[in-house]
Image (cartoon, rainbow, N blue to C red):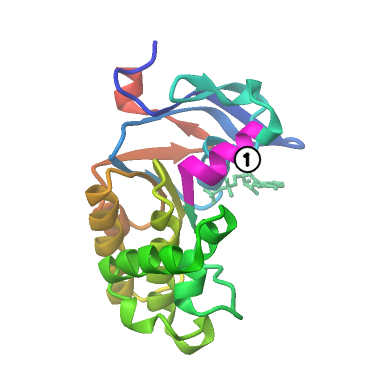
Amino acid sequence: MTPAGSLLVARDLRKSYGPTPALDGASFSIHPGEVVAVMGPSGSGKSTLLHCLAGIVTPDSGSITYGGRELSTMSDGRRSALRRTEFGFVFQFGQLVPELTCTENVALPMRLNGVKRKEAEEHALRFMAQLEVDDLGAKRPGEISGGQGQRVAVARALASNPKVLFADEPTGALDSLNGERVMQLLSDAARSSNTAVVLVTHEARVAAYSDREIVVRDGKSRDLEYAG
Ligand code: ADP
């Protein structure tokens, strides 16, 4: 049974790379607007779980539904459209385009979806203001700090108004002060736009910004809410 009101639900996911099981029966669910931290030691399967949930990696078995629709039965085109329109991504290194200014980076996904430059950049600046990086709009990624770059990357992910933001160790390359600042702004911005966040981290101080934690160990996760 799908837990009431869940947006994204995974049941009993299994995935092996050769003889190595990366996921060995993981279950997960998230509600709209909720921030969930996926925790566990290195190599336990956190990134594989996130990539399966985001439709980037196909599990060997198990089911993943988004808004009640099974991901595995969607065409590749439909799945990438879902990723483009409903999901946002932030990784350990912001992966900003070095040749573009920060504003152009945040506006880029909207521009690719056909939004006019002026409108896209105005919208971008509103999200950059929420992440307190609007004064860096004219700078290029090489001219700003790692923490500022991650905040620009969060603004870019949120500006397309995703229903789910996937963040894989988003503060992993930052010192603790900058890491906490990024997490505070990320969680505030996500909550104010009712975006659910799946946050992969191995750090308790990062997980402290979540509403709920699930722990992955040896490819197994037990989502207490889901199990209940
Ligand atoms: P975590 O994110 O918790 O560090 P991962 O999901 O990255 O864990 O990895 C889980 C296990 O799967 C590890 O043993 C890892 O070596 C293996 N693994 C992950 N991705 C691949 C891959 N593309 N090819 C081979 N093995 C992989």
- On the image, the x and y values in percent for residue 167 come to 44, 53
Q: Residue at x 56, y 49 (%)?
A: 43
Residue 206 vs residue 221: left or right? left
Residue shown at the point (56%, 68%) measured from the top left: 95
* Residue underneath mark 1: 80
Q: Quadrant of the C terminus?
A: top left
Vertical order, 67 against 175 (above or below): above
Q: Which residues are magenta?
A: 78-88
Q: Nearer the viewer, residue 226 or 195?
A: 195
Which element type, helix, strand or loop, lies under badge 1? helix
Q: Residues within 10 Å of mark 1 (few under 14, many from 20)?
A: some
Residue 133 lies, in percent from the top left, at 33, 76
Q: Is residue 88 above or below residue 154?
A: above
The dominant secondary structure in magenta is: helix
Q: Position of residue 208 (x, y in %)?
A: 24, 53
As drawn, the residue found furthest toward the bottom would be 143
